Amino acid sequence: MSDEFRLGLFTTIIRPEEKWLLAAAEARGIPIERYDDGEMTFGLEAPPRLPDVLLDRSVSHSRAVYAAWFFAHYGVPVVNPPEVIELAGDKIRTSLRLAERGVPTPRTVVALSPEAALKAVEEIGYPAVMKPAVGSWGRLMAKVDDASAAAQMIEHKSALGAPIHSIFYVQEYVPKPDRDLRVFVVGDEAVAAMYRRSSEWRTNAARGGSVEAAPLTPELVDLSLRAAKSVGGGVLAVDLMESPKGLVVHEVNPTPEFKALTGVTGVDIATKIVDYAVRAGRR
């Protein structure tokens, strides 16, 4: 490939995923421009040297969003685009979009104050799951089994002080097997899937859950692609649960990790992402 085409990689740290992305680009002869999200500054005027496309891999939602908006402002295609990162990174807006597009998702109620939060939980019924509107790795999530536990969680979130913690996002607890599903979507393709298992109700691999490859059934592919398209599409991880009424989508991750998924499936996800980014940069 011509050295005229350059791929930008915007990161917080270089994890195994970013090492694989760098190796995949190198294997294709694509020069890389690396950008550290803790060192960059952004002006309103475009800097003189820009990549042809940017892979946004910041682990910070706010940094990822604002960097994507600036690079898009400079005329650089971003994977994922800022609109997608912003929407999919907000669980409340994602729930709204999934519902609007007819994608099955857990019952959800949102309260905008601590005073209304307990009412939201009781509208859902016990047990219920309280989540932060923005966040990953299962942090600050709680399963509440009664009004006392819900009140304690509401008090805890209120004490954190940040405006985002004054918004209360409550979902029904889905009685599922000891596992959930993650499907990795790149553009119009569901490229790999895995089960995440845990004896705890949270199954995140980052919390120590075990993983194994899952078959990409027609139903799973269809639902995952519909969920991905509902937030704008791109490079996304779709998280699903097996409810008594069938599969439901509970989250769409706009800056997904894929170390565990690559390990259990053997799928070269990094190369698929690089190829997708190159296509996006050449449109």
Image (tube, rainbow, N blue to C red):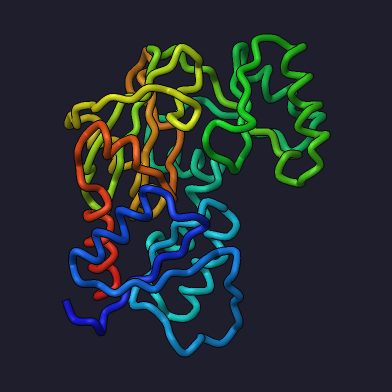
Q: Is residue 93 visible?
A: yes
Q: Pick whichever, 246 or 35, lies toward us.
A: 35
Image coordinates of residue 140 in percent, x first then y, are: 64, 31
Q: Is residue 194 above or below residue 62?
A: above
Residue lying at 55% horizontally and 64% vertically, measured from the top left: 37
Image coordinates of residue 272 in percent, x first then y, are: 22, 54
Q: Pick whichever, 253 or 98, lies toward us.
A: 253
Quadrant in which the C terminus appears: bottom left
Question: In the image, 85: left or right of 42?
Answer: left
Residue lying at 43% horizontally and 41% vertically, measured from the top left: 252
Q: Is residue 15 above or below residue 25?
A: above
Q: Is residue 223 above or below residue 270?
A: above
Question: In the image, 203: left or right of 281?
Answer: right
Image coordinates of residue 216 in percent, x first then y, are: 19, 32
Q: Is residue 85 visible?
A: no
Image coordinates of residue 222 in percent, x first then y, are: 23, 37
- Rendered image quadrant of residue 138: top right
Question: In the image, 183: left or right of 266?
Answer: right
Residue lying at 56% horizontally and 52% vertically, measured from the top left: 61
Quadrant in which the N terminus appears: bottom left
Residue lying at 78% horizontally and 36% vertically, measured from the top left: 113
Q: Is residue 157 above or below residue 35?
A: above
- The number of callouts visible is 0
